[in-house]
Image (cartoon, helix red, strand yellow):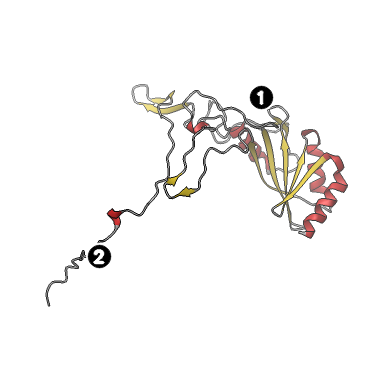
Amino acid sequence: MADLNAHADALRAFFGDKIQLTLAHRELELRVEPGDLLEVCTALRDETDFAYQQMIDLCGVDYSQYGQVEWDSQASATGFSRAVEPVTMGRLSFGDEVEIASEGPRFASVMQLLSIAHNRRLRVKCFAPDDDLPILPSVTGIWASANWYEREAFDLFGILYAEHPDLRRILTDYGFVGHPFRKDFPLVGHVEMRYDPEQQRVIYEPVSIEPRVLTPRTRRKDHRYQVHPTHTVDTGGGED
């Protein structure tokens, strides 16, 4: 823990007001604004005191429902509690929209950095300033491993990475509409596909699945599962 505190002090002394640091659960998180992202990431890689030469992961995050809970997963004597007010698209009808609950920026790009020289890890978080058109600088020029990760974040969250060499979908099908990891994207999707033998091609149709919530089944003590003390069980052994 002392090493983390010392490293946090070194980061604050080097970058000053360009970063915000949070230390919790023995993990150090650095938050930076989009305008300073490339400068900060370059220094994190090149400065010998930091030497974060590997970016092991990058992902997008949608904070629109951050802190909102619709399920209380604690079990009681009468079973599991049920959600009352739906806050996710998984429980809403097709075509409905979920209310954006977060007050701050909605979309963020989160990187996990590794320094082999110092045996340290660092989480770098950068929020897009525009929720309607989230754009962030690409870090592919700093860490080449960000190429496919940024394509994945674009595909699943709709985050655009400026100056990316080949920003296109990587997981969804050609012509896919929407970004499936956004909180307002329905779990059943917008369309379903099937093969039409008459047209001899795959066609897309409106979703026919009705959204529903599965409730965990609770096993209780019940007379049906108790063996009466006067009952005997025939083992099939026969007479001696």
Q: How crowded is the residue under tag 1: few (<14 C-alpha within 10 Å), some, or many (20+)?
A: few
State the count of labels: 2
The numbered mark at residue 141 is none
In this picture, is 60 found above or below 13?
above
Amino acid type at image mark 1: Asp
| Residue holding disc 1 | 132
In this picture, is 233 found above or below 159?
below
The quarter of the displayed image where residue 227 is located: bottom left
Looking at the image, tell me whether mark 2 or mark 1 is earlier in sequence order: 1
Question: Which residue is at the front of the view, 139 or 182?
Answer: 182
Q: Residue 82: x and y, percent?
A: 46, 39
Q: Is residue 156 visible?
A: yes
Q: Is residue 187 visible?
A: no
Q: Residue 213: x and y, percent?
A: 44, 37
Q: Secondary structure at mark 2?
A: loop
Quarter occupied by the N terminus: bottom right
Q: Residue furthest bottom?
A: 240
Q: Which residue appears at 59% of the width and 34% of the height?
A: 156
Amino acid type at image mark 2: Pro
